[in-house]
Structure formats: structure tokens, C-alpha cells
Image (cartoon, grey):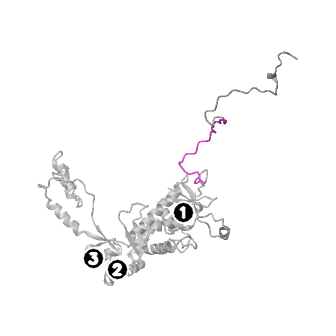
Amino acid sequence: MPLNYTAAHSSRISKPSLKRSASSPFSLHKQRKPISRASSKPEAFDEAEDYFGDRLEDRGLVKTLATDLSLRDVAQTIKYIRSHMFDDLPEAGGFNSVRISEILRFRKSLPPTVTVTHVHAFLRSPTATDKEIAELAKAGVVRKIVVPGRGTGSSSIAEGVILYPDFERLVHESGLDEEIANTLLQRLQDNPLLLNLPSNSFTASEAAALKQAGFLTSSSQGQQPSTPFTHATSPGTLTSLLSVSRAPSGSLAAVGGESAIHDAGGSGTASGIRRSSSQLSTENLHSSNRTFQISLPNTGPYLRLLTAARAHLIALLQKSRFKEMPLYMLRERWDGGIASDDPAARAKKYRGEFTGVLPARTKKWKRFYGLRFEWVLAECLGAGLLELFETGSVGRAARIV
């Protein structure tokens, strides 16, 4: 046996390795490098909302939503829009008796009016529609209602139309005195195209009763924004502008005179400031031009509902990458993903496999009182907020203009 063969080379004897004592109970465990993961996508849009990887095929715009052949004039269109505004209350939708009462009471309180832009969505020519509205208003068939300060242009909600029989019924059911109600209706029949009625059309007691009922609001003719050259509480006049333009350049009169700041509504020493005779005559003329704006009761809740519904539908489209979506998918989003009412869905519910949302918990019923999807779609289409087009593969689709 070789001399260099010792017990250290034997496989039966192993030399213990010297290791430092562990400083912590986890130091003996194997350390692994962290796994590199792919960076998340930017949150410009939700991936769950990005239904298609590319834009939808566009085979032509849809110019009108009229599918019913009976919609041939404005009067029939107004009746159709009003009758298709809300969905029926679903059975077993999760509503209690108090909520059902609130929904029905709110629907009944809304005025029977529609916006002019909504009518445009069902008739082919907006110009011809406006002419027809003017002719029907002159004949006493419809009445046009304008709410100032509610936007301008195609997306305005300030202009509405109501059938005159509905307006007449609303006046008689408002609880007004019969004589005051007849006086209002007579004034409207005598002036079918006027949006404002002179202040001398009613007595003080009649005007107060009609304002309280919501059929009149105060307004003024000839109001103009105040400028540094006019008084803040009176409309600007051409006489004041003419006198300023004729003043020598660089003089105090060229910038409105000594009382320019006071006339613009500012504060200052008014000891030497007096209103001129032209200003007093202007204010007297302004007070004589006081008029009454024709209105409808509960117009405010109606306009708030309309504005919120428009904004919500546009917000649903904005969640998509290309701001467009098929109508069937947009309708599902508007309805809130509630479970369908077909036999298969009812069988799943009985087996305990119900995965849908109760209608009472959706925004459609909590905030919009069951406002129908087709009604909001037509409102946005007529206002020019979106456009419809044929895809050829998934039916009609909507996109933001």
C-alpha cells in the first residue's frame, strides 16, 4: 500500500467544513435573483375596454334613426320621442317600494317637451324640420320653449318644443286659478311665435301666480354686457359710444370721462359723480322693456338629467382606444352589465350561478331613473356629439365626433 494513501482520501471519512455562524435565521436559505417582469402598459386607456386592436370598418354614415314609417312630421316625432324615453321597471330588479315611488314620481314631474336637436335625429333635413316647426307653431300645433344660457350651436339644449295640447293640459292641471290659466292660454294663442310676452300682458297678481307655477320667468330685452363706457346696471347705448369716439385722442373723455370706473361698477368717491339725463332715460327705457319668458314647470331637473346622460354616454365611448364602439356593446355598458332575462339566464339564477348585476345597483337606474339607451343615443346624435356608421361585421357603431 502506498505511503501517501491515508484515511483522508477515504470516502467513509469526511472532513467537516468550517462555516461562520449565521447572523440571521434566513441567511442559510438560498438567495434568488428577482424575476424580471414586463413593464405594465400605460394607463391611457383600460385594456379591458380596448375591444378591438384596430379601427372599425366604416361603410357609410347613418344620417337618421327613423325606422318607423309613421314618423313623417314633427308632431308624430315628438310623440314618439316622449313615449320612448324610459324603460319599464324590471321585475325582481332589486327596487324597494320607496325607490319605485321615487322613480315614478320623478318621471311624472318632467315636462312633456323634447329638444329640437332630438327631433333632428329622426328627420332627414334639419332645415326643413326647423321650417316645419315654425309653421306648426304659427298654426298653434306646437309651442317652442327657449331657456336662455343653455349653450349655443348644434349641441344646445336651450331650444325645446312641446305639443300645444300637452301645454294646455299642463296649465289646467297645475292648480292655477281658471281665470289666470285662460288668460295665459289666450295670450299664447294671440302670439303663437313670440318667445317673450310684454310685462303689460298680465297684472301683478297674475304674473306672480304664473311665476310661482313655473310658466313665466322674468327677462329683459336689449341686455348687453357692461363696458367701461356704460353703466353696469344699464345696457350700452350707441350715444355713449358715439360721444367717446368723437372725443380728442389723449383726453379724459376719450376713455369714458371722470366717472368711467364708477359707471363700470367700481367704487370711488361719488360726491361729484351724478348720472346724466341720458343714463336716466336709458334706465327708464330699460324698465319699460321688461318682458316675461315663457317656461315650463320642472325644466331644471329635465335639463340636468339630459346633460348628465349626454356626458355619461360620451364618457363610455372615451374609454375605448379609438373613441368608437359597436352599438350592442355600448348598450351593454349603458345598461350596466345587468343579467339578461332569457330562459338560460333564469336557469343559471335558479342554480345559484347568477353573476349579473341587479338593475337597482346600476347607474342607469340610480342616477338616470331608467333612461333608455336609444333615447340618449338619439339625443347625442342630433346634438352632433357623436356619429353612427355601418361596419358590415358587427352592425352599427358609434364614435365621438
CA neighbours of label 3 inside 10 A, class few (<14), some (14 to 19), many (20+): some
Position of residue 189 relative to residue 334, above or below, is below
Under mark 2, the amino acid is: Leu
Under mark 3, the amino acid is: Ser
Q: Which residues are magenta?
A: 29-51
| Nearer to us in this view, 133 or 225 | 225
Q: Residue at x 17, y 61 (%)?
A: 279
Q: Residue at x 42, y 79 (%)?
A: 165
Say whether residue 46 is magenta. yes
Under mark 1, the amino acid is: Trp
Q: Residue at x 51, y 60 (%)?
A: 313
- x, y (%) of residue 14? 77, 27
Magenta stretch: dominant SS? loop
Judge whether residue 173 can be spotted in this image: yes
Front of the two marks 1 and 3: 1
- x, y (%) of residue 164? 41, 77
